[in-house]
Amino acid sequence: MTKKITIAIDGFSSTGKSTLAKQLAKQLGYIFVDTGAMYRAVTFFAMQNNLIFVDSFNKVELVNSLKNIVLEFKFNTELGFSEIYLNGKNVEKDIRTIEVSNFVSRVAEVSEVRAKLVEQQQEMGKNKAIVMDGRDIGTVVFPNAELKIFMTASAATRAQRRYDELHQKGDLVTYEEVLKNVEERDYIDTHREDSPLIVAGDAIEIDNSYLTREEQFEKVLDLVNSKINEI
């Protein structure tokens, strides 16, 4: 039987972490978990309940409401990957807007939110055979993961990718607005006190500024196979 490993993929926003993780999970027959979707879902909950605005954030009420937030991933056979549900409702599309993106790093700063979600993430991966992407997977969630990848690219490159994605969905945003969001999220993610975005000491860094999705996938798949063969 092929040995199973835990694959942790961390990195900055809009580096294609989830796309890569989905590809790997499908190829390997592993479970894929998009932790960013979990933080986005909590952010969407906060927005729906008027707990967060541009100039205010009721952290206390959000923390008190965590017990009422149920997150689930359900596999969509037509799409070939799992979608996230918030309290029984599919919110996969709702959480991918620029409005959610503008607030998610602030929500992710809240220690109680991180504690709740990390506990769920660790439970999901207790049997290995999982690909999980996020900001603190290799440093906090799975510090003993057999393979850790840290993905990066220039802010301009990532903003262009994100802008193109949103534009294709019909969202009325400007490139400048997306770039500002990317840079602000980078700052918050790397400067928060609780589990900041850092490169794990044993992570392999991949700058995909000039890599196609296919080139990136093949590069990481080679790393996966090498690691599996080692154990």
Image (cartoon, rainbow, N blue to C red):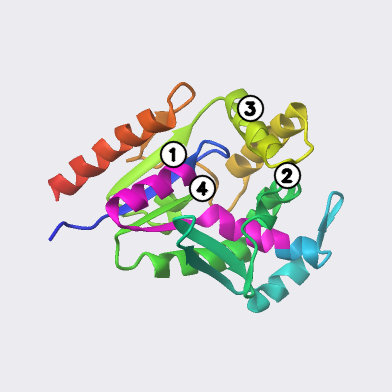
State the SS at label 1. loop
The amino acid marked with disc number 1 is Val
Left or right of 193? Residue 94 is right
Residue in view at x 61 percent, y 27 percent: 155
Residue stretch in magenta: 18-44
Confirm whether the magenta stretch covers residue 27. yes
Q: Name the quadrant containing residue 181.
A: top right
Q: Which dot, 3 or 1, sits closer to the camera?
A: 3
User: Disc 3 vs disc 1: Cβ atoms closer than 8 Å?
Assistant: no
Magenta portion: prevailing SS class: helix
Residue 188 placement (x, y as % from top left): 66, 42
Q: In which quarter of the image is residue 141?
A: bottom left
Q: How far apart are marks 4 and 3 (CA)?
A: 21 Å
Question: From where the camera sits, is residue 111 visible?
Answer: yes
Badge 1 density bin: few <14, some 14–19, many ≥20, Cα 10 Å: some
The residues tagged by marks 4 and 1 sit, at their Cα atoms, a distance apart of 9 Å
Q: Where is residue 38 in the image (x, y as percent from the top left)?
A: 57, 60
- What residue is pinned by disc 1? 199
Classify 156 as above or below 151.
above
Question: In front of the other: label 4 or label 3?
Answer: 3
Q: Name the residue under label 4.
A: 135
Residue at far right of view: 55
Q: Mark 3 near mark 2, Cβ–Cβ under 8 Å?
A: no
- Tag 3, which secondary structure? helix
| Residue receiving disc 3 | 160
Image coordinates for residue 161, horizontal then vertical, percent = 60, 31
Q: Which amino acid does label 2 sit on?
A: Ile
Which label lies toward us, 4 or 1?
Answer: 4
> Mark 2 or mark 1: which comes first in sequence?
2
